[in-house]
Image (cartoon, grey):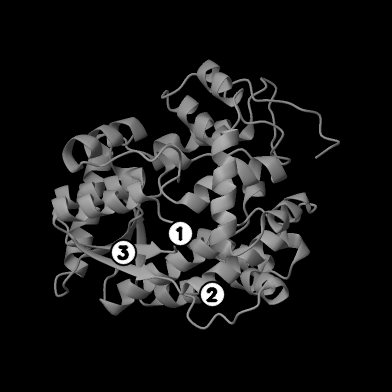
Amino acid sequence: MKDLKYQQCKRCVMDTTDPEIIFDENGYCNHCNDFLERLSKRTYQGKESDQKLVQIVDEIKKAGKNNEYDCVLGISGGIDSSYAAYTLKKLGLRTLAVHLDNGWDSEISVKNIKYIVSKLGIDYQSVVLDWEEFKDLQVSFLKASVPEAETPTDIAIQGVVYGIAAKHKVKYIISGGNFATEGILPKSWHYDAKDVKYLKAIHKQFGRKKLNTFPLFGYMEGIYYKLRGIKTIYLLNHVPYSKKGAMDVLERELAWKYYGGKHYESKYTGFIQSYVLPEKFKIDYRLPTFSTQICTGEMTREEAIMELAKKSYDLIKTEEEKKYVCKKLDISLTEFNDIMSLPPKTYKDYPNSKRMLDFIYNVYRKFN
């Protein structure tokens, strides 16, 4: 990356901090070009989307006819999953909301979940991870010096949600993930969160405790649940959706409150994305977020550039967050700073299943 001449897209704000970025003759990057090309296929398109949604809801209700629930929704207290819960209620679907408690929930997100499930009248289940195991796994990923500090959480969420769906014989899992607000994200910034071999390799090298209860979820588990007929639906791709519009509805009708940044409903995620990734790996998640908003007309490029001129974190607040994170993970500030000083590594530096995962994805795309 040191040898890569700096360049920024002339339409969005993606730049050469993504080493795999490509620019066309107009100076537009592959990220916004691809996003705009796929926008009509992956987001709400009026009557056509309305008809598709009716079909999806009918299928979900039919599959859940003899069950207590029609679907399972992973909920974090963030905008996307909260609005997905709101939409499911409006559609008349019997939803079981499931939350993974990994020990890092902000007070605001906890209250948001409480208000949402109580005001919507939907059932709720929280699964608490074994803190000693999970803490050991998180520290292992920090010591491994890779950007995927959140992979343990990503894997655990899938393991918990799919496990609960199977337990209740539910065939549909609803995800708050959506193309309209998350359609731009460089692949070079985050390796596949379904690679259990990668997780185990890092934990074996840097961890101290056995993972006796941690809910693993890799490609083998994914295949197993698919064979059981469990599907994931990205509901927000089928309805009119914008962050601002969703926030207005949630605040007005469900007493929901904003937590200050994308995925900051988790204190750890906020700290990783605002401080660790930009400082150590030169990865600024504001770039794809703003670029997506530029492409959908929610933000101008000039506004994005003005925001990017500011630090992604507050110096004083971050020092307090650093102390909090270190105390919670049982590591010293010195040890944390030493970790931050380690040379950045990637998944390529550890055993992984990339070849197998690529093969599986290619086969899946061929038949779907």
Q: Which mark is residue 133?
A: 2
Badge 1 crowding class, 10 Å Cα cut-off, few under 14, some 14 to 19, many 20 or more, is few
Label 2 or label 1, whichever comes before in sequence order: 2
**Front: mark 3 or 1:** 3
Residues tagged 3 and 1 counted as in contact (Cβ below 8 A): no
Look at mark 3 in the image and give the residue it sits on: 98
Q: Residue at x 86, y 36 (%)?
A: 3
Determine whether the residue tagged by mark 2 lies in a helix, strand or loop: helix
Q: Which mark is residue 368?
A: 1
Does 216 sit left or right of 92 as displayed? Answer: right
**Front: mark 2 or 1:** 2
Q: CA distance from mark 2 to mark 3?
A: 21 Å
Q: Nearer the viewer, residue 111 or 301?
A: 111
Spot occupied by residue 231 in the image (x, y as percentages of width and height):
36, 65
Give the number of marks: 3
Spot occupied by residue 48 in the image (x, y as percentages of width and height):
27, 39
Determine whether the residue tagged by mark 1 lies in a helix, strand or loop: loop
Determine whether the residue tagged by mark 3 lies in a helix, strand or loop: strand
- Residue 368 to residue 260: above or below: below
The quadrant holding residue 124 is: bottom left
Q: Amino acid at mark 1?
A: Asn
Residue 217 visible somewhere in the drawing: no
Q: Quadrant of the N terminus?
A: top right
Q: Amino acid at mark 3?
A: Val
Q: Residue at x 28, y 50 (%)?
A: 111
- Residue 192 to residue 66: above or below: above
Q: CA distance from mark 3 to mark 1?
A: 28 Å
Label 3 or label 1, whichever comes before in sequence order: 3
Q: Amino acid at mark 2?
A: Glu
Q: Residue at x 71, y 62 (%)?
A: 143
Q: CA distance from mark 2 to mark 1?
A: 37 Å
